[in-house]
Image: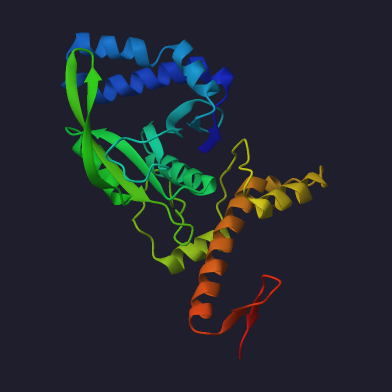
Amino acid sequence: MHIRVGCASDAAALSTFARDAFESAFGPQNTASDMASYLSTAFSPAIQAAELANPTLQVFLAERQGGGIVGYAVTVDAEPDAAVADKTALELKRLYGIGVGAALMNRCLEYALWLGRRSVWLGVWEHNPRAIAFYKRFGFVDVGSHDFPLGEDMQTDRIMLRTVDPLNPPVEATSAGSSAASPTPPAASAAAARNGSTSPFLFDPLPADHPLSDRVLDAFACLPRFDLEREFGCSVLQVACRLRVLEAQVADAAAQLAEKGKLKLTREGRYKYVA
């Protein structure tokens, strides 16, 4: 199984998978008419094509070896629900798949980290205890509720929120079916950030406020024959994201030393160690 970013040509396959996944998850608990009404307005090929082309949405597809969607997730970069205090929080709009939920969740959390966000929020049906328990294992907490219309039935979604900290980055699931504990201890997270993940980490466009990441990309652009994925099992953008984590850890360590009087800021804007 691998995870990649969806593209326009995935609209038809994604439409079929998303419709079937939603119907399988919620059909038994809702009327046929309500389900038909919602499915017709949420998962048509045209709607999926529009979402894949929407710059405020990021669609991640989990595929089995040889092709075929086995799960997907969608994030939305827009103003969050009123119950969410952090108005820059990234929304996790959808996450479906059997045995790939932990891996997809980690991609979404890493994506939020890559964007420089401090929190991720989502809405989950109040009568879906399995999903609520899954999100709690990833550190999400209940912060409120909102209405969710399913056909003629006005349902209630619980709003859940978790922080995303570059000093405590998400850790890759140990297997496709495993669930991650949350939060991960900083020491374990730092080790994971150093070791990296072996799965693709591809995002476009690159945020403009990451100069160190830009330098990494520029350096590898000068080596067109160098296959980073093949040589080291990770993408250039994954390396850039790990550098962002490292930058935050170094800045945090420097701040702690400065508080103890071990570092002083020079006129050139650099830290000087005081023995």
Residue at the bottom extreme of this rendering? 275
Q: Residue at x 26, y 38 (%)?
A: 159
**Would you say 158 lies left or right of 51 here?**
left
Residue 128 appears in the picture as rendered: yes
**Would you say 44 lies left or right of 142 here?**
right
Residue 63 appears in the picture as rendered: no
Residue 6's image quarter?
Answer: top right
Q: Residue at x 43, y 42 (%)?
A: 88
**Would you say 214 lies left or right of 243 here?**
right
Residue 268's image quarter?
Answer: bottom right
239 vs 84, nearest the viewer: 84
63 vs 49, nearest the viewer: 49
103 vs 110, nearest the viewer: 110
**Percent from the top left, x then y, of residue 82?**
29, 36
149 vs 257, nearest the viewer: 257
**Percent from the top left, x then y, of residue 165?**
44, 56
**Percent from the top left, x then y, of residue 187?**
45, 69
Q: Residue at x 35, y 12 (%)?
A: 41
**Percent from the top left, x then y, of residue 255?**
52, 73
In the rendered image, the quadrant that contains the C terminus is bottom right
Residue 66's image quarter?
Answer: top right
